[in-house]
Image (tube, rainbow, N blue to C red):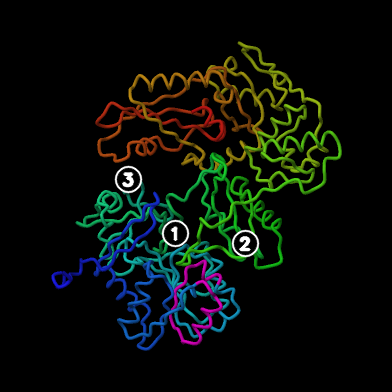
Amino acid sequence: DVHKRQGEVGSDGAAYVMFTSGSTGRPKGVVVSHAGVVNRLVWMQERLGLVAGEGVLQKTSFGFDVSVWEFFWPLLWGGRLVLARPGGQRDASYLAGLIQAEQVRVAHFVPSMLEAFLAEPAAASCGGLRWVVCSGEALPVHVVRRFFEVLGGVGLENYYGPTEASIDVTAWRCAPGWDGASVPIGRPVANTRAYVLDEFLRPVPPGVVGELYLAGVQLARGYAGRAGLTAERFVACPFGRAERMYRTGDRVSWSADGELLFAGRVDDQVKIRGFRVEPGEVASVLASCPGVGQVAVVAREDVPGDVRLVAYVVLSGEISVDVVREFAAAWLPEYMVPSAVVVLDELPVTVNGKLDRGALPAPRYTAGTGRAPANPREEIVCAAFAEVFGLESVSADDDFYRLGGHSLLVIRLVEVLRARGVSVSVRALFDAPTPAGLAASVSTGQTELPGNLIPAGATAITPEMLPLVDLTAEEIGRVVATVEGGAANVADIYPLAPLQEGLLFHHLLADGGTDVYVTPAVFEFDSRDRMERFVEALQRVVDRHDIYRTSLVWEGLREPVQVVWRQAVLPVRETVLGPDHADPAAALVALAGAVMDLRRAPLMDVHLAVVPGGDRWLALVRMHHVVRDHTALEVLL
């Protein structure tokens, strides 16, 4: 009975339920209160000061929370509600005409749609706008610059907020001439608090990235019919207030000026061949390439187990895909360079103007369109390329990297070629990435490497025993002094590979602090006995493989070297975890830290801990990237 439901509605009562997509595919109904919505609308009026009669453009679907302020803000303060036609929110030309015809003063754009709008020539005639509000996605720096080039007299606001916090909770006013590295999301709105915390809910200092937690009147009541999910995302606030905090899942940091800087999603980080990559960082670099209008970068796994970065670009100038690839290779580390660049007429967007990732097409790695092999050597190399990439054929002029090649496939290709009698180095493929170039630069004969000339039980090592490195007797003495057991425990000494040199550089740059290339892996065991057998197996792996008994030496040497120890004991340390750790695995990783001495083998250690309140055990295996890659780790563990 409708009449029985009528009555006074309190400020904590539900104003609406807005459904958002869930990570499991099951939508979540967010219950938002009247108090939260009213606070947000009053704050916006105090900030932008809508004058009676001014037009506000309403173009966002009512299934998305931006539509709430588009509808109710003008109605509360005497403004005019200007409704866009259905589907008009995607038509930049139509929107420009509507803004001019209806004298719209305030309009909202998702950043990707704002970029498309600014590319419309008619947008320059929309100077009658007073304010443009951006939210829904990270606002790129180049879009801000373009905005003030096209609409110099119009104000631009950058808002941030999840549906779980009544539309928007932070705001930043963009300024012409601003030249920061990223666009801030600003400071909290009225009656709202923002906390940037680490995994133990401890505040992090300015400049350090943590997870954003929100508190205040604008928090939603929770998820309709999802008590467990509500308890997981809305947690108790530990900062002296009897209130809840919402865990956003967004990574941010405080600037020195007290502004929040968006750093991506906690779950947006992807691992590409063992390296952690933020696709947003790659997109930011590509967006600065002259001739690139819009860009989106995503990690795709079109083949199970093969994760690749793919860049989707809308070109605004007369440039080729080759130019974009070369720009990426010049400004990004190899592992962050997209495997494919796909040119689109426009980026697909959802009904609310956000990037529609599901509509991005899979890249097509094509080959065989160039000339055929000209000699038997080229035929061998082309066949090896085809085998590695799973293609029917490859032409002599196809480029390894344009076919989707990366550092791990380089290693596989080298092995395939050697099995066919073609000796080739990894560096040769970087210098000559086509079958024709590679065939011309290599020899079909097997390369003979000098044998190990250090005899077992040697009490001294001389320069003549080290054919792969040029060390003086004094330098050899410095190397031997770093090895437990001295010369008798030295199996071999040779130079660092180019990738290892880069990793050592970053290690030295850390100056004894956190080394990002110390990679952790946590394993859980149902008994101490099984865990101890696992540790014993790891020690046998160390005993068997030279690389796991290798250390680095650089102090007092002209060039750094790696030293293979004959015997190296795997360090094992036992740690006691307190009962208050919600995530014992994360606590164990934090306690172990990310510092490792590269001068002592093995560059691997194990930290053990019993799970509080039970009989299960955790084993944290830390290994430095200088002695392993992602494929090796998968085989090992």
Q: Earlier in the sequence, mark 3 or mark 2?
A: 3
Residue drawn 40% across the image and 30% down it: 523
Indicate the secondary structure of the residue bearing disc 1.
Answer: strand
The residue that disc 1 covers is: 262
Residue drawn 24% across the image and 56% down it: 244
Give the magenta part as a residue range. Answer: 90-116
Instruction: Tell me the kind of residue under disc 3.
Output: Phe
The image shows a total of numbered marks equal to 3
Q: Earlier in the sequence, mark 1 or mark 3?
A: 3
- Horizontally, residue 592 falls left or right of residue 240, namely right
Pick the residue in front: 609 or 87.
87
Instruction: Tell me the kind of residue under disc 1.
Output: Phe
Instruction: Tell me the kind of residue under disc 2.
Output: Leu
Per the image, is 238 magenta? no
The residue that disc 3 covers is: 200
Picture layout, residue 184 above or below residue 105 = above
> Which residue is situated farthest in the right direction here?
375
The residue that disc 2 covers is: 344
Q: Position of residue 607 (x, y in %)?
A: 39, 29
Q: Position of residue 211 (x, y in %)?
A: 38, 52
Picture layout, residue 539 above or below residue 274 = above
- Position of the N terminus, as image quadrant, is bottom left
Pick the residue in front: 228 or 115.
228
Indicate the secondary structure of the residue bearing disc 2.
Answer: loop
Per the image, is 112 magenta? yes
